[in-house]
Amino acid sequence: MAKRIGIVLFQLGGPDSIDAVEPFLNNLFLDADIIDFPGAFLARRYLAQKIASRRSGPIGRHYAEIGGKSPINELTNRQAKALQQWLQSRSIDARVVTAMRYWHPMTKEAIETLKRERIDEILLLPLYPQFSRATTYSSVNEWRREITRLAFHVPARLICCYPNHPKYISALVRNIRRTMDRFGETDPASIDLVFSAHGVPVEFIRKGDPYQLQIEETVRCVVREGAWKSPHTICYQSKVGPARWLEPSLTKTIRTLAAAGRKNLLIVPIAFVTEHIETLHEINIEAREVARELGIERFEMTPALNDDPLFIECLGDLVESALNNSAERNNICAILWSSRNKEPEPALCPWYTLTKGTHAGL
């Protein structure tokens, strides 16, 4: 009898109402994989509540400006449905569920669903193409905690990252080309491609987090395949707190380009596979306003991949490769991990040797 496969899509999650903004933020700032410093465990709960309370007002207003909730839950559900249909078309008996890190449906709910489905094997598939301690690793840690608490010990494997998967790259290139068409007859050399990724603290990178390397690899592959005459740059957004984060920031990049007399910007949210507040508000409203004030004449943003069929094929290919144990042959990172192992086994990860022997710097 064929195995019944469970596919768990890891994603950030987002508030489904204005009232959910503060508890969502509280969950976010409670995460030890994000907020960590000597003695943090003593103060984390107090600090999380204080920060969430202070930030919920302005952030709630931002959500109000994009419809009163995050679209990430609905869009991720669409991705899950499309992936399940794609797998079924390949005769793969799979149940695809979502496990949001900071808002419902959370990891506990995903596990409870899989329990009812009598799953034989699980693949953990992050909707983060680039690995980071702040995203994939945090979700894996939450998975470990919940399977222990819920006594759920079905063997699991983690597909940890896919920054240069050919179909992921092609989906991004196609998105950029479609958006570039909005510039009409504008000389491509006068259009700046600005690849904006979610930032992380520099300390993460110093400890071996491969995130920045993988962002740069994704951009390199996209630019090579796109073969545009437009100049490009990489920047980072969404900084929180006083610690030093990856630079330059999106705002600083816009200021630099405006000061150089550049007039046409095409912003590419490079590490976001669904629309959410960082794309719809931080880029499309806040950054757009900065650009307007600085004299930028054209400001366009590529949409997120969402349930783009080519991106769904990418996810499907990752699942098939993992099930066929062909990750090594296809140069796809598929770290083997089960509930019996304390740490993921990094032997299959092509980024392992690039980060001095540690996948997440921990």
Image: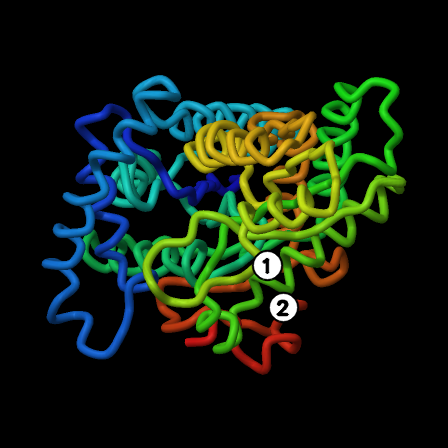
Q: Residue drawn 33% across and 34% down?
A: 14
Q: Residue 10 vs residue 180: left or right?
A: left
Mark 2–mark 1 Cα distance, whole angstroms, equals: 6 Å
Kind of residue at badge 2: Leu
Could you tell me which quadrant the C terminus lies in?
Answer: bottom left
Identify the secondary structure beneath mark 2: helix
Residue tagged 1? 334
Question: Who is closer to the viewer here, 282 or 68?
Answer: 282
**Residue 270 x/y as whole percent:** 62, 43
Q: Residue 149 vs residue 257: left or right?
A: left
- Tags 2 and 1 touching, CB below 8 Å: yes
User: If you read the primary sequence from the N terminus, does the residue marked by circle 2 or circle 1 appear first?
Assistant: 1
Residues packed near mark 1 inside 10 Å, few (<14), some (14 to 19) or many (20 plus): many
Q: Residue drawn 62% across and 29% down?
A: 301
Q: Is residue 324 above or below residue 338?
A: above
**Residue 124 x/y as whole percent:** 46, 49
Mark number, residue 348: 2
Q: Residue drawn 58% across and 49% down?
A: 129
